Image (cartoon, rainbow, N blue to C red):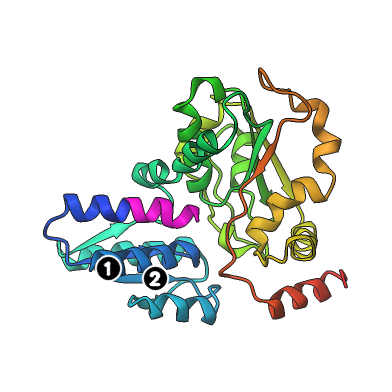
């Protein structure tokens, strides 16, 4: 639910600040567009969601069912985003641009995940690590914003997971500067930002952050295993986070991941399981066949 936490919070703020706003225009590979359409429906705002051609017809239909106009433009999200920005410019003040991940109000909304973890865990317990996937960086920024609000949680390990071919964050950390990928070659299209948020790169140096990149096949295998274990169907953006455990990566890297203060080996690992709208049983079966996982 992190998309509706963040995008919903931003939509509410936009309605408060932009009194003359007649329409919200958002670009999205899928999940942010769904959140925008739903939030605008509840806030009685008109909306347009611009998606790239890689967004499935199913997702476009779901977005339109919430009342948004859906426009398909560009081969990747970045191209759809450029088109959305041009639409806003042409409207000359009657429309407001809504970014899918790169805005502080989105990160503040997402940070409520940490508020709820603090509330739900026993007072003397904090996580060993929090695992999430990284696309554009909205979820990661929200988690880091949340951790900043609780000094006793500031040393919690943050695990940033990406798939090969959608790993702009990992490449930025290695290059020590933002990196723009030439293309998205991963099947995890909802992680398909060519460049990560500059705030993600900035905040990464302030926390115990560990970045890992896995092949699509391991993300698909994790989706399959999670379905068997919990009867929940999630897309590859979640699968790559689940693969941190399912692929045995955690056990392999455990010596490199230090225990936070007041934690033990029994302290919980929190995995943010997000993104189920872009997957069906049929598409997961096809992915399993593609990677010979049946």
Residue wearing tag 1: 87
Q: Circle 2 sits in a helix, a strand or a loop, which is it?
A: strand
Q: Which label's residue is closer to the chain start, 2 or 1?
A: 2
x then y, percent, for residue 182:
59, 56
Residue furthest to the top in view is 261
Pick the residue in front: 228 or 196. 228
What residue do we see at 53% from left, 55% from top? 193
Residue at position x 49%, y 52% in the image: 2
Which is nearer the eye, 29 or 154? 154
Is 286 situated left or right of 38 in this image?
right
| Callouts 2 and 1 close, C-beta under 8 Å | yes
Give the left or right position of residue 175, taking residue 83 as reference: right
Q: Secondary structure at mark 1?
A: helix
Q: Residues within 10 Å of mark 1 (few under 14, many from 20)?
A: some
Q: Mark number for residue 31?
A: none
Give the residue at x 39% y 79%. Answer: 64
From the image, state whether disc 2 or disc 1 is nearer to you. 2
What span is colored magenta in the figure?
1-9
Q: Name the residue beneath numbered marker 2.
A: 50
| Image position, residue 226 (x, y; %) | 75, 60
Residue at horizontal 37%, vertical 67%?
Answer: 38
- Residue nearer the viewer, 33 or 199: 33
Does residue 99 appear anywhere in the picture?
A: no
Quarter of the image for residue 100 reads: bottom left
Q: For the residues marked 2 and 1, what is the alpha-carbon distance in whole angstroms?
A: 10 Å
Instruction: State the image coordinates of residue 40 (x, y, percent, origin top left).
Output: 30, 66
- Is-magenta flag for residue 253? no
């Amino acid at each position: 639910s992190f998309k509706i936490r963040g995008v919903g919070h931003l939509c509410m703020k936009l309605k408060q600040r932009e009194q003359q706003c007649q329409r919200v225009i958002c670009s999205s590979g899928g999940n942010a567009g769904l959140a925008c359409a739903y939030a605008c429906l509840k806030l009685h705002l008109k909306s347009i969601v611009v998606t790239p051609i890689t967004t499935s017809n199913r997702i476009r239909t779901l977005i339109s069912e919430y009342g948004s106009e859906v426009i398909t433009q560009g081969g990747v999200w970045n191209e759809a985003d450029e088109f959305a920005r041009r639409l806003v410019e042409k409207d000359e003040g009657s429309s407001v641009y809504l970014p899918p991940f790169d805005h502080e109000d989105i990160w503040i909304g997402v940070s409520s995940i940490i508020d709820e973890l603090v509330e739900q865990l026993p007072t003397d317990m904090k996580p060993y690590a929090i695992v999430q996937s990284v696309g554009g960086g909205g979820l990661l920024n929200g988690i880091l914003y949340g951790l900043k609000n609780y000094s006793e949680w500031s040393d919690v390990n943050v695990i940033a997971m990406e798939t090969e071919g959608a790993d702009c964050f990992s490449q930025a950390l290695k290059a020590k500067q933002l990196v723009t990928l030439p293309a998205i070659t991963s099947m995890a299209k909802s992680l398909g930002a060519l460049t990560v948020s500059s705030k993600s790169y900035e905040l990464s140096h302030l926390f115990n952050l560990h970045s890992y990149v896995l092949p699509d096949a391991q993300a698909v295998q994790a989706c399959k295993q999670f379905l068997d274990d919990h009867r929940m169907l999630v897309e590859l953006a979640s699968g790559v986070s689940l693969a941190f455990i399912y692929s045995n990566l955690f056990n392999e890297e455990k010596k490199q991941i230090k225990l936070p203060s007041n934690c033990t080996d029994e302290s919980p690992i929190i995995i943010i399981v997000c993104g189920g709208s872009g997957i069906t049983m049929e598409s997961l079966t096809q992915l399993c066949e593609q990677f010979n996982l049946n």
